[in-house]
Image: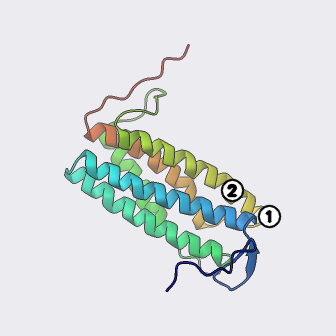
Amino acid sequence: MKIYTKTGDKGTTSDVLGQRISKADIKMELQGSIDEINAGVGYLRALIDSVNNSNAAINVDEILRDIQYTLFRIGSDVSSDFSYNYVKESDISVLENSIDVMTNAAGQLQNFIYYSGNQAAAYCQVVRSVVRRTERVFVRHMEGKEYNLDYQFINRLSDFLFTLARYINYFSKVSEEIMKLR
């Protein structure tokens, strides 16, 4: 299979339903944003692997790989105008349960913190901010429609990544840098 098809050379692409769509369409912006998150999560996995080979890092990698697969499924849902609905409540529950486990380990957040620490934790915050932007694109795409589990997953993913940054610093024994309000 060739990687290039030349069918997009005039500014359009097709979705999984075979419809031609302008590459400037909000649906394509959402697809690209989801792809950007997936690439960021992949890079985050590489950073975490280089930080620590402890059990905590291995468990985190498994969760991140599952997140990448869920993001792939969300892309399929978006491309099919949500006729597939691949995301399930259990996908969201995994994020929520992971947030709870990581918060229990790292402790409740008591202060505003700087987005810092080791490289993997800091990059978590970068990916989190991309997820927040994607969430805003998702809202524009869904305007006038009922929000679905795909959107809920994206919303919860930013919370997960914020908590993961704290957790990575915790298991890497890097202290959080408390922001002093001035």
Extreme-left residue of the structure: 54
Disc 1/disc 2 C-alpha distance (Å)? 14 Å
Q: Examine the image and state in which quarter residue 19 appears.
A: bottom right
On screen, residue 9 above or below 161: below
The residue that disc 1 covers is 144
Judge the density around disc 2: few (<14), some (14-19), many (≥20) Cα neighbours within 10 Å.
Answer: some
Residue drawn at x 64%, y 75% as measured from the top left? 79
Of 65 and 106, nearer the camera is 65
On screen, residue 174 above or below 154: above
Extreme-top residue of the structure: 182
- Where residue 20 sits: x, y (%)? 74, 80
- Where residue 2 sits: x, y (%)? 52, 83
Residue drawn at x 41%, y 59% as measured from the top left? 42
Q: Which amino acid, by three-letter code, is at mark 2?
A: Val
Q: Across the whole image, how many numbered discs are drawn on residues?
A: 2
On screen, residue 131 above or below 151: above
Q: Looking at the image, is mark 1 or mark 2 nearer the viewer? A: 2
Q: Examine the image and state in which quarter residue 117 appears.
A: top left
Q: Which amino acid, by three-letter code, is at mark 1?
A: Gly
Secondary structure of the residue carrying numbered label 1: loop
Asked if disc 1 and disc 2 are in contact, CB closer than 8 Å, the reply is no
Of 122 and 179, nearer the camera is 122
Would you say residue 122 is visible in this rendering? Answer: yes
The residue that disc 2 covers is 137
Image mark for residue 107: none
- Where residue 90 sits: x, y (%)? 45, 68
Question: For this view, does 173 lie left or right of residue 18?
Answer: left
Secondary structure of the residue carrying numbered label 2: helix
**Label 1 vs 2, first from the N-terminus:** 2
